[in-house]
Image (cartoon, grey):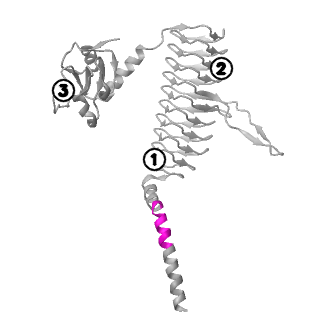
Amino acid sequence: MEFSAEQIASLLQGDIDGAGSAFVNSVAKIEEGKPGSLSFLANPKYEEFIYTTASSICIVAKSFTATKALPSTLTLIRVDDPYSCFSKLLDLYNGMKKKKPKIENPSFVAKSANIGESFFLGAFSYIGEQSKIGNGVVVMQNVIIGENVEIGNNTIIHPNVTIYEDCKIGSNCVIHAGTVIGSDGFGFAPNEKGEFQKVPQIGNVIIEDNVEVGANCAIDRATMGSTLIRKGVKIDNLCQIAHNVEVGINSAMAAQVGIAGSAKIGEHVLIGGQVGISGHLHVADYTKIVAQSGIPSTVKKAETLMGSPGMPHMDFKKSYLGFKKLPFILDKLSELENQLKELRKNQK
């Protein structure tokens, strides 16, 4: 699909600097641009590439001033915020690629399921009894949707996702490939013989609107009640969210985060990759947790935490400087001990 500079400028309310008739049919990073591709320049450290790029159109800030000659084949579209405008274009382009309504075969939809309009169902997918699917939903291939599941309007479920019975997913969500929603929480209790007995997990998972869940994540159902992912939450790949966890609105976590059972994560919390959060604690709104940190206890006020156990990041950096010097300190201590022994010998 091709777009002209005039069409793009109209969408973005930008100004054209160059040929308004220039066309693009792909997108590319500015340093990898080719004829027919659209790029953007938002970070000044990439400015050098605009003078050599082969892209046909580049989105730049209105304040951008070239310090060298630009390629003669390059058309600029000047906007207030190049990054957000480019993101807007990508979103529009992605929407154009959305699947057309269709139910592929073989697939199974239970007779009691309530299916909305403009629905796409990929081959080898299954929708269970009493499930409710909203309008404009896309369910890709090899997806399992259990009984009594609810999915809101315009949500996209990518291949090989499994959604267990009774779970609820809001509108405008994206669930990426391989993710499992509503698997049993890790609940076991030892009996008098020391053998683990499974505690039935009879709750569900509720995911509110505008949530994106990455590939190969696991969000466990509650023992009782609901595991809650509030609206606007963004979850990266390979994350584990245990039973009865609550993640507050507009919080985000990077890959390989693990949150133990019944932890309550506040609103607008940012969690770096490979962070581990213990169960039955609270993390205050607007907290930031640096990658690979461990949070063993409640965080009562918003701050940036680092290390394991997590501590204010400036305290961690000071402590780390001391840790790096520990071998030197131990050598000096050994040297002082030897000198002390010599002094004692001489006194005798």
Q: Are marks 1 and 3 in contact (CB under 8 Å)?
A: no
Residue 60 position within the rendered picture, expressed as x and y whole percent measured from the top left: 25, 27
Of labels 2 and 3, earlier in sequence is 3
The secondary structure type at the circle numbered 2 is loop
- Specify the segment rendered in magenta: 323-333
Of labels 1 and 3, earlier in sequence is 3
Residue toward you, 173 or 130: 173
Q: Amino acid at mark 1?
A: Ala
Q: Quadrant of residue 145?
A: top right
Q: Report the Cα–Cα distance between label 2 and label 3.
A: 57 Å
Q: What residue is shown with label 2?
A: 146
Q: Quadrant of the N terminus?
A: top left
| Other residues around mark 2 within 10 Å, as few (<14) / some (14–19) / many (≥20) | many
Q: Amino acid at mark 3?
A: Leu
| Other residues around mark 3 within 10 Å, as few (<14) / some (14–19) / many (≥20) | some
Above or below, 230 against 348 in this view is above
The residue positioned farthest toward the right in the image shown: 193
The residue shown at (34%, 24%) is 28
**Relative to residue 111, is residue 255 drawn left or right?**
left
Q: Quadrant of the C terminus?
A: bottom right
